[in-house]
Amino acid sequence: MDWASDFDVLDPQYIADPFSVWDELRQSCPVAHSSRRGSSWLPTRYEDVTALAHDIEHFSSLEVAVIPFEGEAPQEPLLAYGLPPISADPPLHTWTRRLLLPWFSHKKVAGYEPLTRELCRSLAAGLKEAERADAAADYAQQIPVRVIAHILGVPPELSDTFTGWVRDVLEFADDQQRRRAGMQALIQYFLTELDRRRANPGEDLLSSLLQTEVEGEAIDDSLVLGTAALVLIAGVDTTWSAIGSSLWHLATHEDDRRRLLSDKEVWPLAIEELLRAYSPVTMARVVQRDVEFAGCPMRAGDRILMNFPAANRDPEVFEDSDQVVLDRARNRHVAFGSGIHRCAGSNLARMELRVALEEWLAAIPEFSLAEGAEVTWAGGQVRGPRSLPVVLR
Amino acid sequence: MRIRLDPDRCQGHARCFGLSPELFDVDDYGYSSLNFEGEVPTELEEKARLAIANCPEYAIEEVE
């Protein structure tokens, strides 16, 4: 495959090891192009990715899906504004983001920590007596969806259903029919939930949005619906992928596992380093009008795949960029993006990752990749292990 | 040592608060500010450097 002019982000080898492709592209063609799934560009340098993220005038967030929808987006006309604020530009972005941010502030996230810890502890306790476990499917995948369900005030018993929809929309996005069905089911569910909240408001995010007035008027229903869908879609696959990749790292790097077990001080830096090295999320932008960027003739309507994971591996910015250095002190990573679209849930994701690793290591300090095990990775919009067989010893 | 935080650059990554909570506050929207005036206490200079070196938006800098 010619990665410079015909890349495919869903290529199985790329999903398993994108790092060597990025290293090569940074040398030969730092902003690659492909005409698969529409004309799109793939930057691989930190400097380019962050510059693109900050130029909101040329690069819009109206389309953020890495795999474009074929035909009309399935949410029309119910989600007239998409999934704000992630799929919005200012001024809509500005005020819808301000409604969401307080739900994910440091203070608020500290309040979600006890239930997250309880959940992780009970999951780990259920696994630790066995000889083997799937650290991705039986642990990582089970955590964020339940925390998000709590924030949205929806029943945790539906977690597997929610996870299924989110995977349909993100992981299996190339199957247009499956993705469409997942999105429709998710929207339909939240439509019913909104009606329920209107009749019986609770303390949750959805009830609060329904009661919020902006300039004396209630918020448009499609905005509440879009925000609800966003919180679920953005808060599940992403964090579970970060937890899964981190456990993969610890299962394959004994020294780092031992260091986390013995050195409490290193944790704050170590969490950031794991986020840098295994950043799960790529978002798209759409070119607003013809522009030349880094020598590339970008046309209105082209997509830019905001390769935050590759930016975080750029040797120009990170010394020994391909090594995980748990106590890395200079680490301006952009795992949560850069500029005005910085992940609104970053405090939550960081807390979940830390608590998930703390509780796993407390229950299962000794573990390694099962011999001959087949680790499967998902990729595209979100990269992380979907199956991670480990031996507990 | 003196440092400055540019509120126009800050996007609320909260990396400074996460690594050096002794020197920073965060508001309900995630944005950071310095929680002291004047010189960085000598024993916290290392913490200030850590915050500078981890800000993805280059919003914190040392000033003369």
Image (cartoon, coloured by chain):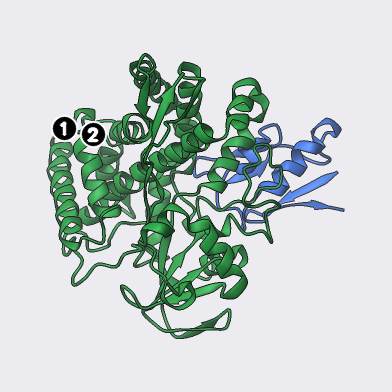
Q: Are marks 1 and 2 on the same chain?
A: yes
| Other residues around mark 2 within 10 Å, as few (<14) / some (14–19) / many (≥20) | many
Residue B29: numbered disc: none
User: Does A45 sit above or below residue A372?
Assistant: below
Chain that bears disc 1 = A
Residue A115 in the image: state x and y as whole percent.
38, 22
* A182 relative to A116 in the view: left or right: left
What secondary structure is found at the residue carrying circle 1?
Answer: loop
* A329 relative to A36 in the view: left or right: right
Chain that bears disc 2 = A
Residue A200: numbered disc: 1
Residue A113 in the image: state x and y as whole percent.
44, 26
Tell which of A187 and A157 is nearer to you.
Answer: A157
Is residue B52 visible from the viewing direction of this image? yes
Residue drawn 37% across the image and 19% down it: A131
Residue indicated by mark 2 = A159
- The kind of residue tagged 1 is Asn
Task: Assign the N terminus of chain A to one quadrant of the image.
Answer: bottom left
Q: The green chain is which one?
A: A
Q: Indicate the quadrant where residue A111 lies.
A: top left
**Colour chosen for chain B:** blue
Is residue A338 visible from the viewing direction of this image? no
Residue drawn 26% across the image and 48% down it: A167
* Distance from Cα at disc 1 to Cα at disc 2: 22 Å
Tell which of A65 and A87 is nearer to you.
Answer: A65
Tell which of A77 and B25 is nearer to you.
Answer: A77
Residue A323 in the image: state x and y as whole percent.
63, 46
| Other residues around mark 1 within 10 Å, as few (<14) / some (14–19) / many (≥20) | few
What secondary structure is found at the residue carrying circle 2?
Answer: helix
User: Does A44 sit above or below residue B63?
Assistant: below
